[in-house]
Amino acid sequence: MNTSLIYELLYKDKRTKARRGRITTTVKAMKPEDVRNTGAQIILANTYHLFLRPGSDIVREAGGLHRFMNWDRPILTDSGGFQVFSLGHMNKITEEGVRFSSHIDGSKKMLSPEISMQVQNDLGSDIMMAFDECAPPDASRAYIEKSQEMTTRWLERCIAAHKNPDRQALFGIMQGGFYRDLRAKSAEAITAFDLPGYAIGGISVGEPKEEYVGVLEYAPDMLPENKPRYVMGIGTPDYIFEAVEHGVDMFDCVEPTRIARHGVAMTSHGRINIKNAKFQRDFGPLDPECDCYACRHYSRAYLRHLFKAGETMSNMLLSEHNLRFLSKLSEDIRKSIEEDRFPEFKEEFYAKYYG
């Protein structure tokens, strides 16, 4: 039995597929206080970027990511696959893996199932992802079917190359594009390995929202109920609510910090752009309903001043706020599921945020 991760299904909403669960991992170390204050319970580190710089060997020598980053809570690492296809140049995909040119210096690199596992083992993350191909949403059915089958073969190689299954939980990734039968085929293949958890890949990659929701209508049901389900790359409230409503437990995205760098904040009444002139003399908090450090100590006018002056503190405070906003949203979602009022909470949130 794999003991690197334990999933407990605690509660299920009576009218939707939303569920409240708990994931327990086994590694503890140190963490930055500011991230702790947002309520984050797990963070994601990027295998592709750490593979290129500083190199997984350096992280391993430092004692793994937990020590290197001074973070004592769980860490999830992706496989590097998505970034290879989105950031790498002159990709050549074969059964062996992907040959690409680094977006940093143009040097030739190779990422394969075995290399991805080696890098993630070096990093020492608590949850690691299998190496897969994230096919473009407009790819033909024939291409997606071949890609999905290769992803399954790559998963088998990942399992064989994984050195620490007792300490690091390996998740498989369902592919299959927007074809229900290919999703079912992928789900059957990857769940045959009885892994600690599974991800639904290949959605939220630029497709129309209705296609994203369409996959959620059936894909989570194809995965075991007693294992965590993960959708990668979603970070806006509407996509989060749709995922939860259809039985997804985990999700991640760069959205909250990326928009913060552009002066955009998520608030209880929707997004605001701190650059707008109307905030020049607004001495109220960013969001009166938020308990983050920025909202407790600084005004919209001051945050606007920092941003307009090009001060990095603006990025830091807005990023912390956005992370806290999504952490609090997740807390409230979990509470609404336990109180059997998830649909009502979704409606109330939408009325304020999108109204």
Image: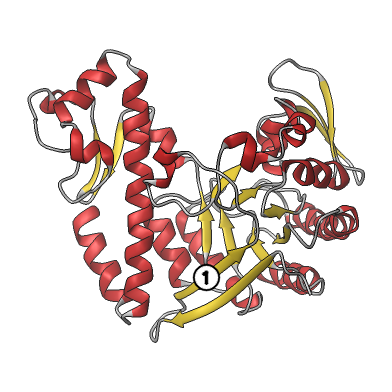
Residue 16 x %, y %: 42, 80
In this rendering, the answer to whether 336 lies above or below 47 is below
221 sits to left or right of 192: left
Residue 50 x %, y %: 69, 32
- Residue found at x 22% / y 66%: 348
Residue 239 x %, y %: 43, 57
Front residue (pair 17, 164): 164
Amino acid type at image mark 1: Arg
- Residue found at x 38% / y 69%: 334
- Residue found at x 44% / y 75%: 18
Reading the image, the residue beneath label 1 is 22
Tell me the element at label 1.
Answer: strand
- Does residue 212 show up? yes
- Identify the image quadrant of the C terminus: bottom left
219 sits to left or right of 299: right
Identify the image's colour scheme: rainbow, by chain, secondary structure or one colour: secondary structure
Number of other residues with Cα within 10 Å of mark 1, as a class: few under 14, some 14 to 19, many 20 or more: few
Front residue (pair 327, 95): 327
Residue 325 x %, y %: 32, 49
Q: Residue furthest top?
A: 309
62 sits to left or right of 261: right
- Residue found at x 80% / y 18%: 107
- Identify the image quadrant of the N terminus: bottom right
Q: Residue furthest bottom?
A: 14
